[in-house]
Image (spheres, helix red, strand yellow):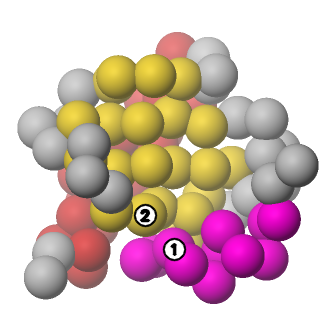
Amino acid sequence: MIDIREVADAADVIINGYAFTKCALGFRVLNLNAPEKAVVFSSNEEVMETTMDDIEISIVSDYLKKNRKYMED
């Protein structure tokens, strides 16, 4: 089971309840309010894996595009 607090603490940014974490594949995003909803984006922001619906992916993708600069090294 996922420890939401650990995920939130390890996140690079949290935006509107979504924890964004940079990873080797690109970016992992977890909905902290519904932890069964997650998505992995490649470094060029293509969806690689997901349990989110298309609307939620669109919302999270917009958050990523607008806030990616805060996750860069």
Q: The disc labelled 2 sits on which kind of residue?
A: Thr
Q: Which residue is mark 1?
A: 11
- The answer to whether residue 55 of the structure is visible from this angle is no
Question: Is label 1 in a helix, a strand or a loop?
Answer: loop
Vertical comparison of 11 with 66: above or below: below
Residue at 68% x, 49% y is 31
Tell me the magenta residue range: 3-13
The residue to which callout 2 is attached is: 21
Q: Position of residue 35 (x, y in %)?
A: 79, 46
Residue sticking out furthest to the top: 54
Residue shown at the point (51%, 49%) measured from the top left:
29
Tag 2 or tag 1, which sits nearer the N-term?
A: 1
Q: Are discs 1 and 2 less than 8 Å apart at CB? A: yes
- Looking at the image, which is closer to me, 51 or 65? 51
In the rendered image, is residue 73 in sight?
yes
Q: Residues within 10 Å of mark 2 (few under 14, many from 20)?
A: some
